[in-house]
Image (tube, rainbow, N blue to C red):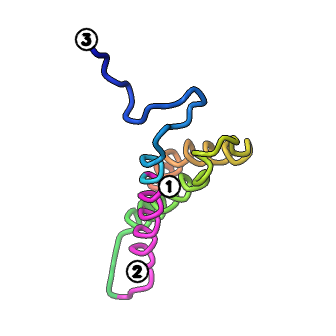
Amino acid sequence: MAVPPTSLVPATLSGRPEDPTVVIIYDLLIIIGFIVCTAVLLTAVISRRIIRSRPWYIFMGFSSWWAIQHQLLVGNQLTLVPPPHPLCLLQSSFIYAAPPAITFSLIFVH
């Protein structure tokens, strides 16, 4: 009886995926998400005819910020050299601080 794989991308002993396709697709989706969120946000900010509520602007701004957070290590996922520790610390700090920051900012909107 065969044992089903635990992940979609088999990892080598170094922890790096054997097939970089999934990592590249993830990076591209994050970059596209940042471009789209920023374009939508800037369109609403610049246009005088588009009226949105403050929570919408906060949500779209943090969506763009979320995409930036996940782009900090783009290009370092598949190398044999680990990324710099301060960069990893900065990214993890941003990622873990984002949900409380969104909640805190939405509390004081009204």
Q: Which residue is mark 2?
A: 43
Q: Image quadrant for the N terminus?
A: top left
Q: Residues within 10 Å of mark 2 (few under 14, many from 20)?
A: few
User: Percent x, y for residue 12?
Assistant: 53, 30
Q: Residue furthest top?
A: 1
User: Eyeballing the image, is 60 above or below 51?
Assistant: above
Does 32 appear in magenta? yes
- The image quarter in which residue 43 lies: bottom left
Q: Which residue is mark 3?
A: 1
Q: Earlier in the sequence, mark 2 or mark 1?
A: 2
> CB atoms at circles 1 and 3 under 8 Å apart?
no
Q: Is residue 50 left or right of residue 105?
A: left
Query: Residue 85 versus residue 61: which sits nearer the camera?
Result: 85
Q: Image quadrant for the C terminus?
A: bottom left
> CB atoms at circles 2 and 1 under 8 Å apart?
no
- The image quarter in which residue 41 lies: bottom left
Residue range in magenta is 26-48
Name the amino acid, label 3: Met
Name the amino acid, label 2: Thr
Does 103 appear in magenta? no
Looking at the rendered structure, the secondary structure element under dot 2 is helix
User: Percent x, y for residue 24?
Assistant: 47, 53
Q: Earlier in the sequence, mark 1 or mark 3?
A: 3
User: Eyeballing the image, is 76 above or below 53?
Assistant: above
Query: Residue 80 versus residue 87: which sits nearer the camera?
Result: 80
Q: Which residue is mark 1?
A: 66
Foreground disc of the pair 1, 3: 3
